[in-house]
Image (cartoon, helix red, strand yellow):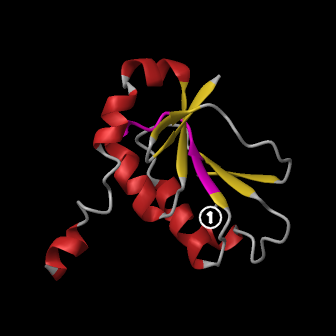
Amino acid sequence: MSVIVRDDGFHAEDYRGDRILEIATSTMPEALPERFDGIEMIRVVVPAFSDGRGFTLARHLRGRGYAGRLRATGPLIADQYAMARRSGFDEVEIPDDLAARQPEAQWLFRADWLEHDYRSRLKA
């Protein structure tokens, strides 16, 4: 099982569609689709919290115009939540055992990702 993390906390899986594209972090940005017709969700599979390529892929997907649900899935840690959101992910899917080690409160602490962006501090 797994837990879906969003800005308002932990959720059970609620996606019921079947139009999912799964992308590995080893995918080169130039190999990403040019069009997203019919794709409701893209899951970027992150094999380890130390693999930051998923953030780059999320940025490229959004840059190519993907406006659907974008999910990072894998053993990301709460400290990476703000970066995941800033790079374009809507949500993060983590394993149950990780959710037990890093409870919802730790993720919610980082859910104010818009407020603690260095760019917003520079504009002030």
Q: In the depicted view, which residue is nearer to us: 55 or 117?
A: 117
Residue 32 in the image, given as x and y percentages of width and height: 70, 68
Location of residue 68 by image quarter: bottom right
Judge whether residue 26 can be spotted in this image: no
Q: Which residue is under mark 1?
A: 28
Judge whether residue 121 can be spotted in this image: yes
Amino acid identity at mark 1: Met
Q: What residue appears at the point 65 percent right and 73 percent down from the top-left corner?
A: 30
For residue 69, above or below residue 81: below
Q: What residue appears at the point 43 percent right and 48 percent down from the top-left corner?
A: 7
Residue 119 in the image, given as x and y percentages of width and height: 24, 74
Residue 75 in the image, given as x and y percentages of width and height: 49, 33
Left or right: 19 as drawn, with respect to 13: right
For residue 56, above or below residue 100: below
Quadrant of image for the C terminus: bottom left
Q: Is residue 50 magenta?
A: no
